[in-house]
Image (cartoon, rainbow, N blue to C red):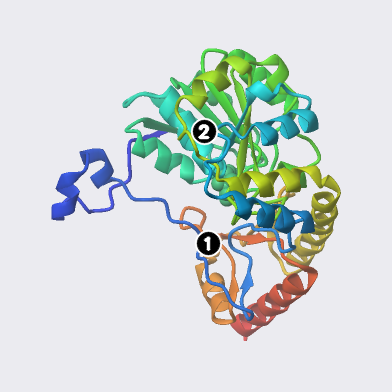
Amino acid sequence: MSVRKSTNSGTMSSPAAQLVLPHIAQMAGYVPGEQLAGDSIVKLNTNENPYPPSRKVRDAIAAACEDLVLYPDPSAREVRECVADLYGVDADGVLVGNGSDELLSVLVRATTASGQGIAYPVPTYSLYDTLTALQGARAIRIPFGPDYSLPAELAAADARLFFLCNPNAPSGTILPRADLETFADRRSDAVVVIDEAYVDFADESAVGLVERSPNVVVLRTLSKSYSLAGLRVGLALTSVGLARQLHKVRDSYNVSRIAQAGALAALKDQAAMRAHVDQVRATRTRLSVGLREMGFTVLESQANFVLAQRPGEDASGLAERLRDRRILVRYFPDLPESLRISVGTDGEIDALLKALAEILSAART
Ligand SMILES: Cc1ncc(COP(=O)(O)O)c(C=O)c1O
């Protein structure tokens, strides 16, 4: 088990650093994936959906633009009711956020004081480290084993809050629902967050746990399966009692009228979302097979990305060579043998596989 308080980015010495709290000055900020755009860029580094959102979203947003003099509904009631219908949960147990990142931040602020523990298996979504450091809390990072099953020590961690990213990023692997259920029961004294940002690409969701475990929060986002990363809408599904507490922590008008209108239209058009998810799942299989044929080890992914490993070799050079060809993939220094590759369109994946084959063959000669 490794316990990390914060990451020192060496910024303590600047005059501005003296103006903020010492633990903020000491920590490194979150580094999002590069957001280069342009027709000639094949962008496979931040797990966006390569397909457009439902056409109904644009019309709903246009209509919402007529009403911008008024504040939005503070609790996004219509969106909450739609989510409740979709998942068979109580609308009063749903929160809507400015992306699920905001809801993660609300959860940290609501549950964990400075010095208290927040636990999660690693490698995982690196924002958990950043939010923990911002709060001055203790990160309890427990390494996954090679099969990415739930590490046995996790349940014993001295933590107020647990993050279980499921499917996990960057591995794409999924924990069985039964294991999550056992874990939530065992740690009924803490909040257990199941971050399901990628679950629409998976075979199974744990959303049913919300009904039986009042300490479970299931997080969803419209950024991935609904193709709306730019709209910034996330959802938290939990017990009514816990939701009431969490509402106190978020900004009163945290989701704009435009975002609420777009989210409602997207959630109502399940067929549009499903069609694109099915296409991404099919391309994911092609991508995994293609990478394996080239000698990569590829974990079975339940998400819209794959983790491709070249055991014993550093993958940073490969990421650089791809970048030279305007193909962006994600390289994590903590996982030096791996590249995380988002599932793009079939054409984008063909371009990636061709480029990789050429780079690898040039390296051999
Ligand atoms: C595991 C995980 N959770 C949450 C998020 C944040 O999503 P959102 O765009 O809703 O803030 C991401 C985004 O990449 C993610 O990978």
Q: Is mark 1 within 8 Å of ligand 1?
A: no
Q: Secondary structure at mark 1?
A: loop
Q: Which residue is mark 1?
A: 331
Q: Amino acid at mark 1?
A: Tyr
Tell me if I can see residue 253 in this picture.
Answer: yes
* Picture residue at 59% right of the left edge, 18% below the top: 215
Tell me which corner region of the image, top left, top right, bottom left or bottom right, holds residue 358.
Answer: bottom right
* Disc 1 residue crowd, few under 14, some 14–19, many 20+, Cα 10 Å: many
Q: Which residue is mark 2?
A: 120
Figure check: 85 above or below 187? below
Q: Quadrant of the N terminus?
A: top left
Foreground residue among 324 and 147: 324
Q: Position of residue 16 (x, y in %)?
A: 17, 52
Foreground residue among 332 and 29: 29
Q: Position of residue 272 (x, y in %)?
A: 83, 53
Q: Position of residue 365 (x, y in %)?
A: 62, 86
Q: Secondary structure at mark 2?
A: strand
Figure check: 309 above or below 138? below
Q: Position of residue 191 (x, y in %)?
A: 53, 21
